[in-house]
Image: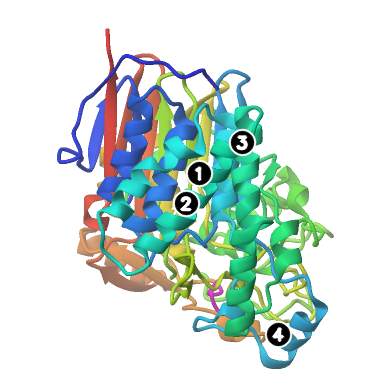
Amino acid sequence: MREPMTGWASSVTVDGIEWKASGTGGGVATGGRAAASAGIRMLEQGGCAADAAAATLLALSITDYGCYAIGGEIPLIVYDAAVREVKVLCGLGGAPLDQSAMDWYYENRIPSQGSIKAAPVPGAVSLCVAVIQHYGTMSFEQVVAPSLALLDAGGQDWYARLAATFRRLIETERATPGTREEKLQAARDRFYKGDVADDLVAFYTREGGFLRKPDLVAHTTRIEDPVSVQYRGYTVCKCDSWTQGPYLCQALRLLEGFDLREMGHLSADYIHTVTEALKLAMADRDEYYGDPLLVDVPMQELLSDRYTELRRPLIDMGKASMTARPGDPIHMRALKGPGTLDPGPGGTTTCVVADRWGNMVAATPSGNGPYAVCRELGVAHGNRLRSLNTTPGHPNRIEPGKRPRITLTPTLVLREGRAVIAISVAGGDLQDQTTLNLLLNHIEFGMMPDEAVTAPRFSTGHHQDSFNPDPRRRKAICDLGSLNVDVAVNQHTLKRLADRGHRVKTADEPIGAPAMLLFDHSSGLIHVAGDPSAARHVAALEAET
């Protein structure tokens, strides 16, 4: 990315942050208002998109506490404009390494209602450091400053303790000789290898958790290649199968064979076709996805032309599917034969950022409540291990060090080699369904972000619940044949959908909580928007002339 620059003028103040904005100097779309301000502050100070993203993510652990916490997890996709390269940073920790912990899970099942026993290694702190270490220009002290201001202003009883933890990392960063990157590494290592880690382990032991010092020491923020597909001239990039993200790619491949634009936005044909594609893609998600470091996920086959062509005819234009139908990409069959595993909303927030140089970040931070809080440090832990299961032979079964297959799924889109769209959605299993709505709103129907995030949306519960660890995966199915449609969609369309067999319900609450960013390279304008009904906030800058 770029060296820091000065000479910025903000187009908004903190009080002026709204749900949509445009500017040539950079943009942020996120959850809490003060988190948007934190990101914009970094851009004002000459930081790049990675710096702004880290500041936003740290602040979100305060402003969006309950949806995300500093002991949670963050998948992040970054585009480096200098080298025109997309990478994924995995801010997700794994299960305990101790086999005795695995024995306990298989005997007692993974806790599904919140427990320190269901907490993976906390990944957010390492991710925030890694993104500025590899793609940013600033120090940890700089990007955490807005968060410290929020904590020092007072509020929850854990604020002062988390502020003290952050200051311990700053202290190490200041005292460490060497380069900016070496200082950042030392600060990060104090959390995972030093006295902060010791305090965390004391908490785990006292509360009956399974994580120990070797788990923290072994943790790293992996930098990986994205999974990507081409769709109508765009390159859509997702995280690998440790998230649900690739199923969006599968759905897009199926939809390539239909003229969605001709069907018309939110017509019965359009909603039916997209929903049926989602059902097929999610069936494969539930059947095959897991941590690719420990599971052989047939991703190349799942996204192949041949498999897509086998699966596409399963979309019956006159009838809604009422069963979960995974395919067989290994033997190239449209449906999996006998012996298949039984087919079968959490707290999350949002973050998308771009700077004037064309760098872009999409991240989806989360931490499922109820939290287990280390009071000494102010570090709250979620229970993401409940996104694993104890089903023998299942690719997402719990194993030592395994990353759970999470719903968190940021999206970054390229056109002609440059990043043009970033999307982040809160909403568990709704995340990529909402993302697909937004992508098609723009790519097929030309909507700008403010239109795309506020247009009526739809979703289905025709999938396994990603937060239900029941080993009987059939018990994890949400609602086969369901179709949830925004109340604004007209009654004639709803009747036509019901006539095809969809179990139609209307929603007067937001279907997912999206934030979207669009970089118009022809004008240099960065457009950001977040659904105001879902309490999203954005800000944009104008570069000084």
The residue carrying pointer 3 sits among few (fewer than 14), some (14 to 19) or many (20 or more) residues within 10 Å by Cα, namely many
Question: Residue 183 shows which numbered tag?
Answer: 3
Between the C-alphas of marks 1 and 3, the distance is 9 Å
- Marks 4, 3: nearer the viewer: 3
In this picture, which residue range is highlighted in magenta? 464-469
- The image quadrant that residue 442 belongs to is top left
**Residue that extends furthest to the front in the rendered view of this protein:** 175
- The image quadrant that residue 334 belongs to is bottom right
Between the C-alphas of marks 3 and 2, the distance is 14 Å
Which badge, 3 or 2, is on the more N-terminal residue? Answer: 2
Q: Secondary structure at mark 3?
A: helix
Question: Residue 170 shows which numbered tag?
Answer: 1
Answer above or below: position of 388 versus 300: below
**Amino acid type at image mark 2:** Phe
Q: Horizontally, is 351 left or right of 137 in the view?
A: left
Residue annotated with mark 4:
105
Which badge, 4 or 2, is on the more N-terminal residue? Answer: 4
Contact flag, marks 4 and 2 (Cβ < 8 Å): no
Q: Is residue 372 magenta?
A: no
Residue lying at 23% horizontally and 43% vertically, measured from the top left: 19
**Residue that extends furthest to the right in the rendered view of this protein:** 331
Res. 318 in view: yes
**Amino acid type at image mark 4:** Tyr
Residue 528 locus on image (x, y percent): 31, 35
Answer above or below: position of 407 versus 252: below
Residue annotated with mark 2:
166
Classified by dominant secondary structure, the portion drawn in magenta counts as loop
The image quadrant where one finds the C terminus is top left
Q: Secondary structure at mark 2?
A: helix
192 or 24: nearer the eye? 192
Between the C-alphas of marks 4 and 2, the distance is 33 Å
